[in-house]
Amino acid sequence: MVLLGGCQAEPDFDTKFEQQSRDLAAKARSIDADAKKQLDAVREAERASAELGKPATAPTPAPVTDAK
């Protein structure tokens, strides 16, 4: 009888569904916030690069060497 006092009834489907829904919504908001931060950083880098007169995505060419 003492052991039964520590057991709880498992939450019903609706309760579990609501909890999962809240958890997924929180994860989605976190992912959206991270993506927005990254996009803002890229835009800022492009803006700064444009102010310097260089395209942000143009790679710097490697020096040409005549290795024989």
Image (tube, grey):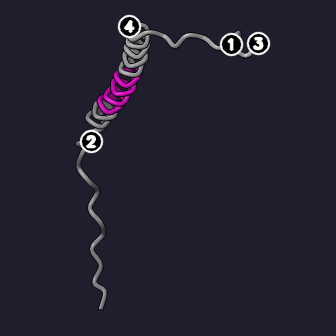
Q: Where residue 25 sits in the image (x, y, percent)?
A: 37, 15
C-beta proximity under 8 Å, tags 3 and 1: yes
Q: Quadrant of residue 68?
A: bottom left
- Please rate how many residues cluster around mark 3, counting C-alpha atoms within 10 Å: few if below 14, some from 14 to 19, many from 20: few
Q: Which element carries disc 4, helix, strand or loop?
A: helix
Q: Foreground mark, 2 or 1? A: 1
Classify mark 3: helix, strand or loop. Answer: loop
Badge nearest the viewer, 3 or 4: 3
- Image height check: is 46 above or below 26? below
Q: Earlier in the sequence, mark 3 or mark 4?
A: 3
- Residue positioned 38% across, 19% down in the render: 24
Amino acid type, callout 4: Asp
Inspect the image, locate mark 3, and give the three-letter code of the amino acid beneath it.
Val
Residue at the spot of label 4: 14
User: Which residue was labeled with disc 3?
Assistant: 2
Q: Are marks 2 and 1 in contact (CB under 8 Å)?
A: no
Q: Which residues are magenta?
A: 30-44
Mark 3 vs mark 4, CA separation in Å: 30 Å
Residue extending furthest toward the bottom = 68
Please tell me which residue lies in front, 64 or 25. Answer: 25
Residue at the right extreme, as displayed: 2
Residues at circles 3 and 2 in contact by the CB criterion of under 8 Å: no
The residue to which callout 1 is attached is 4
**Residue ID for mark 2:** 56
Quadrant location of residue 53? Answer: top left
Query: What residue is rendered at 33% in x and 34% in y?
Result: 45
Label 3 – label 1 distance at C-alpha: 5 Å
In the image, taking residue 53 as reference, residue 40 lies left or right, namely right
Q: Secondary structure at mark 1?
A: helix
Total of numbered circles in the picture? Answer: 4
Dividing the picture into quadrants, the one containing residue 5 is top right
